[in-house]
Image: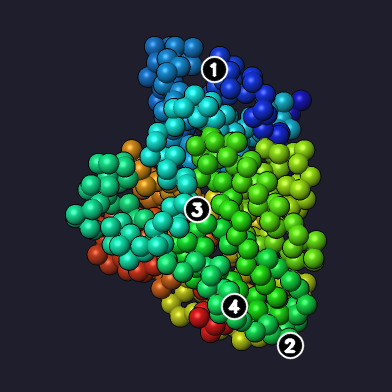
Amino acid sequence: MKEGSTDAPIRHPIAWNDPDFYDPAKIEAELHRVFDICHGCRRCFNLCDSFPRLFDLIDNSASGELDTVDPAGFKSVVDACTLCDLCFMTKCPYVPPHHFDLDFPHLMLRHRAAEHRRGETPFVQTQLAQTDRNGKLAGAVAPVANWATRQGNGLTRPALEKLAGIDRDAALPKFHGTTFKRRAAKEAVAVNREAPGFGRKAVLYATCFANYNAPEIGMAARAVLAHNGVETEVVYPACCGMPLLEQGNLEGVAGNARKIAAGLLPWVDKGYEVIALVPSCALMMKFEWPLLLPDDAAVVRLSKAVSDIAEYVVDVAKTAGLAPGLQALDGGVALHIACHARAQNMGPKAAEMLRLIPGQDLAVIERCSGHGGSWGVLKEFHDIALKVGKPVARQAAKVAKAHVASECPLAGAHILDGMRQLGDASTIVPETAPHPIELFARAYGLV
């Protein structure tokens, strides 16, 4: 039996249909077991705020060990977890197949699932997770919604903070009256028949964020793929369920997974590959869904057909070659690799993609931005999110590139906020942090 593990990590199916999964006593016993191992290791001390909170609980206890820690304090550790998966994927030496069998993020998920089943998920958080409803309603009045949620709006943001617990200084996504799916239906794009990759076909799973909040991501992806000979269709049955997963609403995630699988598999059967435009959604489709529904043949089959957009472009480049015309972007690019891209265990594909641009000046930042989905905009956690992401903001400011990009749009805006808060007048902060596929489209002159 070896101490650490150099084997590839594996994950067990999530037993969310087993009543024991929600048993408070069994959850507390597992928290004790895992936290005691974490206390003896402490390798994850600088990943997020969960681990400092845990170690402070232990260090400030009567014995300096876990046996004198009040279990009521465990909730603060759970609440600080953003489910980024980096401890499981990059740090922990005790993940399966090691006999200690640690999966810290999924244990935090189990605790939240039990809370959710007991009806303890805060109301505001449940409403934030209704991304499809929110996108449709806010999109119908997009100018008003964007005015009300704009950073610096001294009339509405303090009220939103008081009523909904959303920090007045947090960057919030904008809404569009015309979704990506509608724009794609209205604006035809010609497929380049001379491209080396001509003949491939792909479905762009719009994702709730690209569909309602950032259609420019989808339009850029569509333009790049068409230029490289790939025929695309845009499909959006529903949200992937990541916001629901963050709250432990596993039944809701499973329902969305089944709905999306039913909507996308007919395209797979017609020879189309599936592309997710945001890494959190690709992670859900590839890994989390099959762990929740391992016996659902449709979900498992779809999971094997999904690629992240950067992963797909790199594959086109490697298997067929790219269409000519790429030109380096002036001023260089600071690229943040999103946690949920790293957790897909596919390598830094966004960096590989941007390196396909001849002579592109590129600095890569591989560390958590601290945002954590809707977690980072809440008043309770926003300052912590900025603290966790400060090293990323410092790196982005230090390399001083004209463009700051992130695969995660929420993380990108959060990094820019962090750069502004550094207080260095010499730091030049771009107005926006685009998705890497947008920069790739610019390098082609397509947008």
- Image-quadrant location for residue 309: bottom right
Q: Nearer the viewer, residue 111 or 367?
A: 111
Instruction: Indicate the secondary structure of the residue bearing disc 2.
Output: loop
Can residue 433 be seen in this snapshot? no
Instruction: Indicate the secondary structure of the residue bearing disc 3.
Output: helix
- Work out whether 176 lies above or below 59: below
- Where is residue 254 shown, x and y percent of the image? 64, 41
Residue drawn at the location 74% of the way across and 38% of the way down:
294
Q: Identify the mark nearer the N-term, 1 or 2.
A: 1
Residue pointed to by mark 1: 24
Report the Cα–Cα distance between label 1 and label 4. 51 Å
- Work out whether 437 lies above or below 164: below
Residue pointed to by mark 4: 223
Q: Nearer the viewer, residue 275 or 79?
A: 275
Q: Identify the mark nearer the N-term, 2 or 3.
A: 3
Type of the residue with mark 4: Ala
Instruction: Indicate the secondary structure of the residue bearing disc 1.
Output: helix
- Work out whether 200 lies above or below 57: below
Contact check, label 1 and label 2, Cβ < 8 Å: no
**Label 2: few (<14), some or many (≥20) within 10 Å?**
few
Residue 194: assigned label: 2
**Label 1: few (<14), some or many (≥20) within 10 Å?**
few
Residue 436: assigned label: none
Report the Cα–Cα distance between label 4 and label 2. 15 Å
Residue pointed to by mark 3: 132
Residue drawn at the location 30% of the way across and 62% of the way down:
144
- Work out whether 305 lies above or below 322: above
